[in-house]
Image (spheres, grey):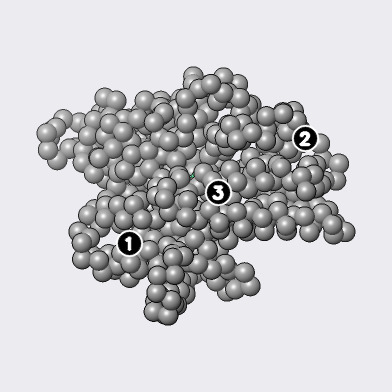
Amino acid sequence: MQIQLRFPGVLTNSPLNLPPSPSKLPIIGNLHQLGTLPHRSLQSLARKHGPLMLLYLGQTPVLIVSSADAAKEVIKTQDFNFCNRPRISFAERLFCSNKDLAFSSYDERWKEIRKISVLHVFSGHRVESFRTIREEEANFMIGKIYECCSSASSTVNLSDIIFSFTNNVVCRVAMGMKFGDNEGAKKLITEFMNLIGVFNVADFIPWLSMVNNFNGLSSRVEKNAKELDCFLESVIEDHIDRKKKTKNSGDEDFVDVLLGMANDKSNRVYFARDNIKPVILDMFIAGTDTTATTLIWAMTELMKHPEIMKEDDLGQMHYLKMVIKETLRLHSPAPLFIPHESIQDTKLLGYDIPAKTRVFINQWAIANDPMLWDELEEFRPKRFLNTSIDYQGKDFKFFPFGAGRRGCPGILFATPNMELPLANLLYHFNCSLPNGVISKDVDVAEELGLLLRKKSPLLLVPTPCGF
Ligand code: HEM
């Protein structure tokens, strides 16, 4: 059945030419077709219905974009029209009414926060200033693995160790502290990240929102939002006190930088203390697991491909960069990005797209499109040799960090946080698989929550080699 939505303006009275839709069920629409790995289910559906599909997730129409041309149209040519974010209710509560960057709608306040963050928080200069923190944490990580090597059980849970590395770097850079023994703070942030990744049926079938009162989700969100607020308030207070005592110490973390911005009258939009907390939370949501997940997948693929491990060039930076690209192609941590939303009615590849349509960009499907890639299921870093394909958002067959107004601002921050620990791991250890597992049986099962993660932890037996 064709839905007879109509444009309010120009096309009044003419039925809309909407993108094709797979048939749907009452109430839930196409929700049942998402499965547990929506990026893969949506890729299969796109093969049948085309690069632009309109699905109904509950009562919400969602445009699914699955080709390089369509993606380019959405996040480059018509970027201005597709750079809004839809309302996501748990994020709204947890991010203090979406005063953050990642989930906030496109408005003057978002533009100002983005400008401030890009200039003062994510810039190359700032990223360089955190070099010592990265190096210390990489050394700490190597030391921890080394300790495990000399203990009775030589099997190491590399996933845990890598998560601690990225978490420590982000905590120090953002707030000037490590969680260390602060189990309370660690649990608080873990719960926050779990809640942001939870599938909330009320975002698609609003009249079912009361379900969250019975399954406990509403009270978990409420509790977490209040506790986060208290915790971050105390972090900000500590920073203010410290600043009074040690003026211009030089070692500024993000809270210091953002406090400096708060109440600066030259900002077009008032950037206040309330904006600091959600921007710091963005760092955890967007900056820790993305990087850790990529590193874990890179090591997983290398263990699965001993022939690559033996390559003489593997220790060279240009090869490592290709390993990271190939990992991001096969296992991009945000395969469907963060949802976008159209601002005005528009035409896309000949179809009518009404204002306020939610958009999922299936970047994973494009990076795994047989029309664009040879032997696409193979982990083959050398496919990037002598090509100009990069992940800076200029090439629409491979853009794991997005592009345009909503493209990832953390790309400069993420790059050394992947390269440095990976280079260190490969330099310091020869790794083998535990309990007789052979390379071809290395588990690559995926799990999609907020991010596309490796389902089981990566267990390895490291042997020191570079000391
Ligand atoms: C491997 C690492 C990473 C990948 C693959 C990645 C990828 C992405 C993607 C795909 C988006 C959404 C693009 C869109 O919706 O169009 C995004 C947004 C974002 N990322 Fe990253 N990211 C990574 C690391 C980081 C880091 C380290 C930070 C911060 C330190 C960060 C901060 C952000 C923020 C704040 C946004 C929201 C931007 C906005 O809506 O204006 N990301 N990232």
Task: Kindly report the distance in space between the C-alpha atoms of the residues bearing marks 2 and 3.
Answer: 26 Å
Asked which quadrant contains residue 30, the reply is top left
Q: What is the CA distance from the residue labelled 1 to the residue labelled 2?
A: 46 Å
Where is residue 191 shown, x and y percent of the image? 53, 65
| Mark 3 close to ligand 1, CB under 8 Å | yes
Please tell me how many numbered marks the rendered image carries: 3
Of residues 409 and 12, the one nearer the viewer is: 409
Q: Secondary structure at mark 1?
A: loop
Q: Position of residue 301 (x, y in %)?
A: 67, 36
The image shows residue 337, relative to residue 222, as above or below, that is above
Q: Nearer the viewer, residue 157 or 194?
A: 157
> Three-letter amino acid code at disc 1?
Lys
Residue 426: % across, % down: 70, 42
Of the numbered discs in the image, which one, if any, rests on residue 76? Answer: none
Could one spot residue 3 in this view of the protein?
A: no
Q: Which mark is residue 417?
A: 3
Q: Amino acid at mark 3?
A: Asn
Disc 1 crowd rating (10 Å Cα; few below 14, some 14-19, many 20+) is many
In this rendered view, identify the residue nearer to me: 114 or 429: 429
Name the residue rendered at 55%, 56% in the picture: 132
**Disc 2 element:** helix
Q: From the image, which quarter does the N terminus lie in?
A: top left
Q: Residues within 10 Å of mark 3 (few under 14, many from 20)?
A: many
Quadrant for residue 358, please give it: top left
Residue 439's mark?
Answer: 2
Residue 2 relative to residue 320: left or right: left
Residue at position x 45%, y 44% in the image = 411
Q: CA distance from mark 1 to mark 3?
A: 26 Å
Residue 59 percent coordinates (x, y): 35, 47
Q: Which residue is mark 1?
A: 99
User: Up-down: is 40 above or below 142?
Assistant: above
